[in-house]
Image (spheres, helix red, strand yellow):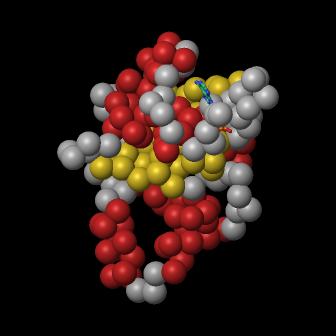
Amino acid sequence: MKSQHPLKSEPLPVSAFHKAWRAKASRLWLGEIWSLYLHGSVGTGKTYFAELFYREWITPGNLGYFVAPDVLVRHIRDLETWSDYQEYWGRHQYCGKSTLLVLDDVGSHRSTPHLTEQLTMLLLRRHRENSRTIITTNLSVEEFAAAVDPRIASRLQEGEIINTGTKDLRKAT
Ligand SMILES: Nc1ncnc2c1ncn2[C@@H]1O[C@H](COP(=O)(O)OP(=O)(O)O)[C@@H](O)[C@H]1O
Ligand SMILES: [Mg+2]
């Protein structure tokens, strides 16, 4: 049976992925780029690939956080003071070179101006600090520019972009 939750399932078949995806991801791994942007339609393996990278990344020296943007923003919204806010960011260490952040499924939840603003601030900072960041989304970079922020979209072009296409792997079996 195919698991919907690769994090909890058997080892992932790295060889199942296209070489070009792995080559782009390895640039992120090496710290040559700050971002890896996976976009394509639903079921094309975006989350699966991001989880594979995340799982390999997490070691005692390498931290990471895998989160859906709406959950991240809900956490931030629940903080009451500036010092709570700083403590939260520090605790999860969203920034810093060795801390990987995976934002899974950006743009698929109902957005609010607050969510967009927080996400933009977070991504601007990560870009500035060259902190490894993976985004999975149904949005093309142009759509991301319109829906989230054009400055981030421009910075994403400095990183690698993987178009995962349209083939729904859930329907492939
Ligand atoms: N390379 C792969 N080999 C085998 N199964 C895969 C692969 N990539 C994805 N899958 C499976 O296909 C389904 C859809 O993948 P998922 O990453 O959730 O898609 P997306 O995030 O693009 O919507 C999942 O059940 C996942 O386990
Ligand atoms: Mg997904």
Q: Residue furthest front?
A: 1
- Give the mark count: 0
Q: Residue at x 71, y 27 (%)?
A: 169
Give the farthest residue toward the bottom.
Answer: 80
- Residue 163 appears in the rendering: yes
Q: Residue at x 61, y 70 (%)?
A: 114
Residue 113: image x %, image y %?
Answer: 66, 68
Task: State left or right for residue 14 relative to residue 3.
Answer: left
Relative to 12, is 106 above or below?
Answer: below
Viewer-proximal residue among 126 and 132:
132
For this orientation, the residue located farthest to the top is 19
- Whether 29 is drawn above or below 77: the answer is above
Residue 159, x across and y down, in percent: 46, 31
Q: Is residue 150 left or right of residue 63?
A: right
143 vs 95, left or right, is right
Using the image, determine if residue 128 lies above or below residue 36.
Answer: below
Residue at position x 41%, y 40% from top?
Answer: 54
* Farthest residue, direction left: 61
The spot of residue 145 in percent (x, y) is: 66, 45
Look at 69% across and 67% down and name the residue there: 112
Residue 117 percent across, percent down from the top left? 57, 64
State the quadrant of the C terminus: top right
State which quarter of the image contains the N terminus: top right
Query: In terms of depth relative to the viewer, which is nearer, 79 or 48?
Result: 48
Q: Is residue 126 visible?
A: no
- Foreground residue, 129 or 38? 38
